[in-house]
Image (cartoon, rainbow, N blue to C red):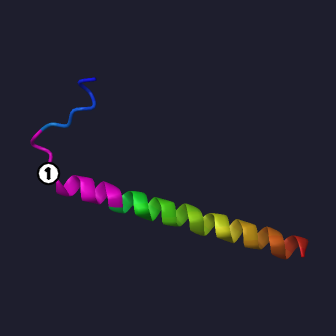
């Protein structure tokens, strides 16, 4: 359980950066998913 605790020296901005990275990752995954689905639809259609 001690691993979950973050050191007090870690700034609050770090969490915001992680959130931004998560948003970019989610957006990228959705974009890839849309491209793959549309490509399959075009190939099948």
- The C terminus: image quadrant: bottom right
Q: Is residue 38 left or right of residue 45?
A: left
Outermost residue toward the right in this view: 45
Would you identify the image quadrant in which residue 2 lies? top left
Q: Position of residue 1 (x, y in %)?
A: 28, 23
21 over 10 or under it: above or below: below
Q: Position of residue 32 (x, y in %)?
A: 62, 65
**Residue 13, magenta (yes or no):** yes
14 over 32 or under it: above or below: above
**Residue 30, magenta (yes or no):** no
Residue at (32%, 54%) from the top-left corner?
A: 18
Q: Is residue 25 left or right of residue 1?
A: right
Q: Position of residue 39 (x, y in %)?
A: 77, 72
Q: Quick one: label 1, few (<14), some, or many (20+) residues within 10 Å? A: few
Q: Is residue 36 left or right of residue 5?
A: right
Q: Is residue 25 left or right of residue 30?
A: left
Residue at (16%, 53%) from the top-left corner?
A: 12
> In this picture, which residue range is highlighted in magenta?
8-19
Q: Position of residue 38 (x, y in %)?
A: 74, 73
Residue at (50%, 66%) from the top-left corner?
A: 27
Outermost residue toward the top in this view: 1
* Label 1 secondary element: loop
Would you identify the image quadrant in which residue 34 lies? bottom right
Q: Which residue is mark 1?
A: 11
């Amino acid at each position: 359980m001690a691993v979950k605790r973050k050191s007090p020296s870690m700034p609050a901005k770090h969490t915001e950066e992680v959130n931004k990275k998560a948003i970019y990752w989610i957006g990228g995954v959705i974009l890839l998913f849309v491209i793959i689905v549309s490509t399959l639809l075009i190939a099948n259609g």
